[in-house]
Amino acid sequence: MNLGLKYLLLFLLLLVLFVLDLVLGTTYIAPGKVLEVFEEHGSVTETIVILGFRLPKAIAALSAGMGLSVAGMLMQTFFRNPLAGPYVLGVNSLSSLAVAVFMLAGGAGSALFLQLGVPFAACAGAFLGLVLLLILSHKIKSATHLLLVGMMIGFLAGALQSVLEYMANPSELKNFVIWNMASLSNVTGKDLLAFFILVLFSCILCLFSIKPLNALMLGDEQASLLGVNVKFARNFILILVALLSGITTAYCGPVGFVGLAMPHTIRMLLRTTHHLHQLIGCMLGGAIFMLTCDIISNLPVFDNTLPINVITSLFGAPFVIWLLFKSKTNFE
Amino acid sequence: MRSRIFRLRKPVLFFGLLLFLFSCSEEKEKVDVPFSAVENKYASYFKIYKRDRYTLLVTFLNAEKTDSAVYALFKGEKPELQSEIHGIQIPVQNVACLSSVFVGFLNRLEAISAIRAVDNMDFVSNQQLLDLSAKGSIKELAKNGPLNIEQTLTCGVNVLFTNPTGDKKKDIDARLLGANITPVVCADYFENHPLGRAEWVKAMSLFFGKEEMADSLFAETERKYFALKASVDTVSYKPTVFTELKTNDTWFVAGGKSSLAQFLADAGADYLWKDNGKVNVTALNMEQVIEKALNADYWINLHLSNMPSEILEKDKRYGEFKAFKTRNLFNNNRRLNLSGGNDYWETGLCNPDEILADLVNIFHPDLQPVKELKYYKQLK
């Protein structure tokens, strides 16, 4: 099957899942009624459920999936580590810690400041995490060791976050705990538009990193010989990852496993190492994965919304175990 | 089958223990009379048994009532007791309250001066206690988390009123007992009738020898409560009501058999989840609440919100509810202290007639049992 056909199938699957996400939910609304809502003939309740609740959630799922999946792909190439991902290497943890510092240590006063400050803090935390990993990656050559160090950074950030939570006042703590639980349904209105545009813009910026990414696969020296400004390329990729990971974490909270699992799935599916195809594949695949998780988390059988992180982990964790078994020699 | 037997084992053991105690005591204390149980009218998570030399207070430690703690409250010389029964000499002089509702009960019993420690002064609204705290007379034992055992051991209290955690060993900590501090575990929040929780004043009164006062206070509360209830019984219009805001993706609404549902029914309101048959909160998502509550008349108990704009800041979709558009938004946070502690949870729960008066005023303003709301306020 050629790549074009694969893209087409992925795109069609994405469309189907997007529509399914609008049709399926904890309350039953017949597909015909969903159409009526878009034709502006639906009842008030159905209109609010579809346009006010399900549609923003589906767009948030699509954006979060694209952002995290592309960030994971960039990190895996950047660190030349198949287990790299914003969640695994502690980037999300530092992003959460930065938000915790902002929200719990007296940073967030007004609602407006909270709205502006959280995305900034999340991006700054993600960037700090990446810089730290970059410095450590020069010292630590073993992929396994780097992975372990990343996990330790995650634990350290988690512990500091616990201290802040312990000392926080109840209302600040509540706001933070809610944010930290991760959710797709809390992004609405202008926030949703900003989220979608920022993710899309960052993904478009990734197009400028295709050549360096392909070259970096061969190692820094080979990349230099191919005319890539390695230092500039590394910094550029780092900023892109911080943007994608930070923006998604800011709006949806720390969502796990998407960034780790999806790039592998796409590489296996498309059978390509070219980063242009990986980028498009990850955008489509990440969106498909998150839409699927969102549909599952809102299935009527559960009688409530399951936390999105539970679903991504239920799918993501077995995948990582399988990956470890399948490719264990590569990580030595 | 095995688990059912296991669940039954503890109540059977407890009543066996009472029988055993009764039979042993009869031989040792020839003059003592048999236990006489004091019947509660609404509360079901404590029992009082009277003897002439002491009173037994039994408190249940979980919702299923499969575990309990037994306290023998005596005056003067300590009677011989089974090791499982915790003897407490009354009246107690030095107590700690690890929940603000206990402060409310002690306030009703005019026993605030016995309080030496609380969990966190931020939650306390009682002025007398705030004054004592300002003088440095009140210790805080759980300011930012779990109970600080070291501070508790050294704060000089004999009785610690606390809520159950589900782990009896943790609730009745051996280290505290060893230091002559008896944790009195009160599962008052499991009561599913507002008067059931208020009736706990009777249990608390035992520690201060103020049973008659408690009986009188409770009887007055009950009388006022039912007078208010009777005033709405003839009203045909029952406005629809829903409660709470969502927390992340989940909207926790009170169960149809909960204390809040009872309050709403007695205030002449039609609670939207009154038929779900649950005592505990029910987790729903926003879709489910929109489907049912979009056109509801009233929306109450809105977390910490003070203004409609604060609700919208949390989620703009809240603005679609009819109750929001008509500003029929009422929150139970009229009486906040400077630290944000809410008196609703301190004195309100001990005085359910006052909460009911607020609710009747809200849902049936024409009846107006009180001129001004005490615990609730309209968000404008």
Image (cartoon, coloured by chain):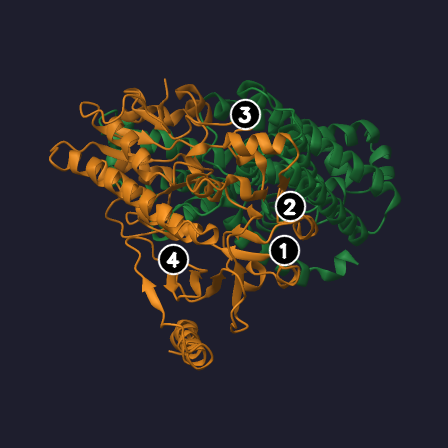
Chain colours: A green, B orange
Q: Amino acid at mark 3?
A: Leu
10 Å crowding of disc 3: few (<14), some (14-19), many (20+): few
Is label 4 in a helix, a strand or a loop?
Answer: loop
Q: Quadrant of residue A248?
A: top right
- Where does the image place residue A164, in percent across and percent down from the top left? 67, 37
- Where does the image place residue B219, in percent across and percent down from the top left? 28, 45
In three-dimensional space, the C-alpha distance between marks 2 and 1, rounded to whole angstroms, equals 20 Å
Disc 4 is attached to a residue of which chain?
A: B
In three-dimensional space, the C-alpha distance between marks 3 and 4, rounded to whole angstroms, equals 33 Å
The residue carrying mark 3 is B338
The residue carrying mark 1 is A320
Is label 2 in a helix, a strand or a loop?
Answer: loop
**Quarter of the image that includes the C terminus of chain A:** bottom right
Q: Which mark is residue B45?
A: 4
Whether residue B68 sits left or right of residue A180 in the image: it is: left
Q: Nearer the viewer, residue B358 or B25?
A: B25
Please say if the residues under marks 3 and 4 sit with CB atoms less than 8 Å apart: no
Disc 3 is attached to a residue of which chain?
A: B
